[in-house]
Amino acid sequence: MHTPTELIGASLKWKPTATGWRLFDGQRRFGDVVPDKKYPGMWRCVLSGGRLSDMANLSWALNAVLEAATRELIYEAATTPRIAQ
């Protein structure tokens, strides 16, 4: 049997958008990765308020969004009260 922390992030899925990639957990959206407008082959993560991260290759940009989503899910799992059955 898996512990809750082993399953965190298990349902995260990347889906293509018109210009880049978007990370989902079911219907919940976690983040976007978009191509850099000036440098071909470079990507940026969309941050809060529409700001863009520093440039990175696609693998690093996808990983940055994935890591942020995983941290958020772990935090939520740790701070959500459990209901006794």
Image (cartoon, grey):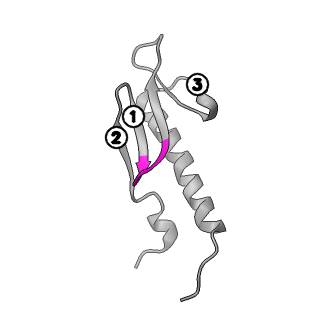
Q: CA distance from mark 3 to mark 2?
A: 22 Å
Residue 3 shows which numbered tag? none
The residue beneath circle 3 is 54
Relative image position of residue 51 (x, y in whole percent): 61, 26
| Residue 84 shown left or right of residue 13 in the figure | right
The residue beneath circle 2 is 15
Q: CA distance from mark 3 to mark 1?
A: 16 Å
Q: For numbered disc 1, what is the local secondary structure?
A: strand
- Nearer to us: label 3 or label 1: 1
Q: For numbered disc 3, what is the local secondary structure?
A: loop
Which residues are drawn in magenta? 24-30
Q: Is residue 52 above or below residue 16?
A: above
Q: For numbered disc 2, what is the local secondary structure?
A: strand
Q: Is residue 79 above or below residue 43?
A: below
- Is the residue under label 2 in contact with that under label 1 (CB below 8 Å)? yes
Q: Quadrant of residue 41?
A: top left
The residue beneath circle 1 is 21
Q: Is residue 35 above or below residue 8?
A: above
Inspect the image, locate mark 2, and give the three-letter code of the amino acid beneath it. Answer: Lys
Inspect the image, locate mark 1, and give the three-letter code of the amino acid beneath it. Answer: Trp
Tell which residue pokes out farthest to the front in this image. Answer: 27
* Residue at (58% x, 66% y) in the render: 77
Numbered marks: total: 3
Inspect the image, locate mark 3, and give the three-letter code of the amino acid beneath it. Answer: Asp
- Of pointers 3 and 1, the one earlier in the residue sequence: 1
Question: Which secondary structure class fits the magenta region best?
Answer: strand
